[in-house]
Amino acid sequence: MKTIEDLKRMREQFQAENSLRQAGGIQVIVGMGTCGIAAGAREVMTSILDEIAKRKLQNVIVRQTGCIGMCEQEVLVDVVRPGEPRITYGKVTADDVSQIIGEHVVNGRIVEKLVVGKITD
């Protein structure tokens, strides 16, 4: 950040992300702890961002988190759809991303073969 314009752009980005969360947008959360990175989380994150851009999805926010202690299941990806259980996918590879985004994020159908956890309210 070098100029006031950079600061304004950053502020607008944060406001847009925050409004998505408050408006009930879909969240995709990638485990980016050292265990996740070692297992390929950077490649998975890049694939997620590319897939969302390719599909021109506007209501999806991608976030990252640190290690949650399930290192043997990395790469971990959570999908949070408003009013539905939070689903944690495990051992996700870049090749799995298209299916997760297409089936779960877009169509609301859980990809059961990759699920390692489900959090309900």
Image: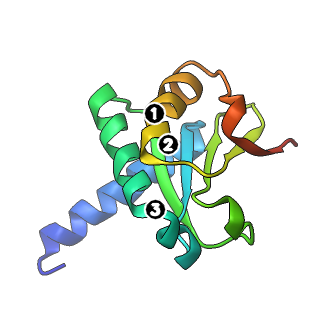
Q: Which of the labelled discs sits on residue 20, or is there none?
A: 2
Asked if residue 77 is positioned above or below residue 11 in the image, the reply reads above
Left/right of residue 2 with respect to residue 63 in the rendered view: left
Q: How is the image coloured?
A: rainbow
Alpha carbon distance from label 1 to label 3? 25 Å
Left/right of residue 106 with respect to residue 15 in the rendered view: right
Place of residue 108 in the rendered image (x, y in percent of width and height, measured from the top left): 63, 22
Asked if residue 40 is positioned above or below residue 117 in the image, the reply reads below
Give the number of the mark in front: 1 or 3.
3
Callout 1: few (<14), some (14-19), or many (20+) C-alpha neighbours within 10 Å? some
Residue 80 quadrant: top right
**Pointer 2 with pointer 3, Cβ within 8 A:** no
Place of residue 7 in the rendered image (x, y in percent of width and height, measured from the top left): 23, 71
Amino acid identity at mark 2: Leu
- The residue where tag 1 is placed is 59
Q: Which of the labelled discs sits on residue 40, or is there none?
A: 3
Lower position in the chain sequence, tag 1 or tag 3 = 3
Alpha carbon distance from label 2 to label 1? 7 Å
Q: Residue at x 57, y 58 (%)?
A: 75
Callout 2: few (<14), some (14-19), or many (20+) C-alpha neighbours within 10 Å? some
Residue 57 quadrant: top left
**Pointer 1 with pointer 3, Cβ within 8 A:** no
Amino acid identity at mark 3: Gly
Place of residue 40 in the rendered image (x, y in percent of width and height, measured from the top left): 45, 62
